[in-house]
Image: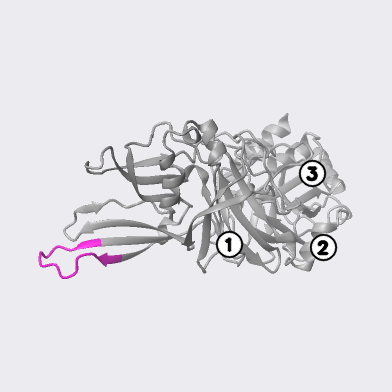
Amino acid sequence: MKIYKFELKLLVLSLISMTFLLSCESDSTSIGSNLIPDKPEGNVTYVDLIAYNISNNDTIRADCNTLTNGLIGVYEDAVFGKSKASFNTQIRLNSSDEIVGTIQEIDSVVLAFYPSYTSSSSTVKEVILNPGSTSGIDTIKYITKYPLSSYLGGGSPMTVKINRINTFLESFESKFYSDKSIDVGDLLGTAVLSDSVTTVSIKTSDGKTVLEPTIPGYRIKLDTEYFKQHFFDKKGSADIGDNSKFIQYFRGIRISPEDDTSKFMVNFPRSTVTLTAYYRYKNDPSDSYTGTSYAFTVNSVYNTVVGEYDFYGRSTAGSQFKQQMQNPDKVSGESTLFLQGMGGPSIHLKLDDTQIEAVRDSVKNKGWAVIDAKLKFYLAEDAVSKPTYIYGYNLTKLSFLPDLTSYPSLAGYYFNPAYNFTDNPGYYTLNVTNHIKNIVEKNEANDEILVEMGNFAIDSSSGVYLGYSRTTRVYEPFRLIFYGNKETGDKKLKLEIIYTKN
């Protein structure tokens, strides 16, 4: 009990001033040169581990219960090969809207979705709408462009197509995987997307607002005649009488890249997807038209969705990647490790049992107190686009690692801190202090860890983590290459432990 109270104080002090702790006691006590290869310098020691790739067969569960974001695009590199992502969503009737009038003229049908963007890096273009005006007051259109913040690749525009699908997506409780075959139906529209989104506003030169800024995003115009024939002209029919009939009749739409040429991948919250028909109506030929709209229900919890991913059999992937996916070295680990979102590979790691036992002995018999423990994953190659997070969980127990929620009141302590894009340190960190303390101080098992791309999902209303398997990995497009445990330099993957002695 005395040791636990002491180490808790040290933990708080360490997070306040790590500099102080590292300059505390210049103890060079070794815990066994035959057990831990790196002799502790001051208050730092290291534990070796075995790390290798786990192939997930390029598939992942990608339905309503896992897919909070949609992902579309196509991308190829020389290491991981080519992958393509499409998004399928069910379309439902809107209980608060109805088709009004006996005569309708469709002005436009717009599918919109809104990926995340970097608001601090915008560029603005001004267009004068009334050149030559003699009033002295101009009307100016402002087009503001924002670069995407969650995408892979970029540079070249990508053409996407919107199709009606013929596959029934069942209910929102159905379980689907990313290799599900979707029968693609009629083409509804196409659009060219860039790696940025725009917003439009209109003001006069004397400061009056004519049009408030639109929301930055993608807006795709669909075939108005198609919706006139297959929706508005069917007013009063059983096909659109209620949702049970409608989802069997219309079924849904698919957003996909038009071809397989490498462009970019982008994800977007599926809760922001909208499909709106703007039309005019009247009840008598002699009447004037009245404008209105019909908003289909696309983004409710009842809309079944499926992420559809194609990795092309990894035919264009590099030879080392293919070898490690097919035959990883589970005995001694690897010098290079691959990590990919969607259904791509994960990283399996296990701390050396003998070296962990040596640390446990030092805690028990030499007065060691572990105050910090972390895993640093150094990038072997700089990625074209980096994710904000990687994460890990207890693979043996299929549960969170305790550090995810252990120290919520300690500012600045995170289990998987966000990558520092400003300083670009070249590594990702997993803080596993409490996990290691449980092993060496409480004799808990040295469980295996699985590391994956993305972050844990959180319930938006309660702020509670949804579970170790509920993550953003399913729609993360990113690819990373790390140094493994066989790396001989200072970027070798290993466990770093900082300790003090009482």
- Our reading of the magenta stretch's main secondary structure is loop
Which of pointers 2 and 3 indicates the residue nearer the eye?
Answer: 2
- Along the viewing direction, whichever of 191 and 343 lies nearer the viewer: 191
Marks 3 and 1, how far apart in space?
29 Å
Residue 197 at x, y percent in the picture = 43, 58
Report if residue 317 lies within the magenta region.
Answer: no
**Which residue appears at 32% of the width and 37% of the height?**
101
**Residue located at (76% from left, 66% from top):** 489
| Place of residue 173 in the rendered image (x, y in percent of width and height, measured from the top left) | 62, 33
Residue 50 in percent (x, y) is at: 82, 53
**Mark with earlier residue (2, 1):** 2
Mark-to-mark CA distance, 2 and 3: 23 Å
The kind of residue on which mark 2 rests is Gln
Residue 265, how many percent across, how many down? Answer: 57, 59
Looking at the rendering, in which quadrant would you find the C terminus? top right
Residue sitting nearer the eye, 335 or 215: 215
What residue is disc 3 on? 448
Determine whether, in the image, residue 10 is placed left or right of residue 271: right
Residue at image position (34%, 36%) is 100
Q: Residue extending furthest front?
A: 285
Query: According to the image, label 2 marks what residue?
Result: 323
Looking at numbered disc 1 in the image, what kind of residue is underneath it?
Ser
Q: Earlier in the sequence, mark 2 or mark 3?
A: 2
Q: Which residues are magenta?
A: 126-140
Tell me what residue is drawn at x 75 percent, y 65 percent: 315
Give the quarter of the image for residue 42: bottom right
Query: Do callouts 2 and 1 mark residues in contact (Cβ within 8 Å)?
Result: no
134 in magenta? yes
Residue 192 vs 179, above or below: the answer is below
Question: For mark 1, what is the residue?
Answer: 385
SS for callout 3:
loop
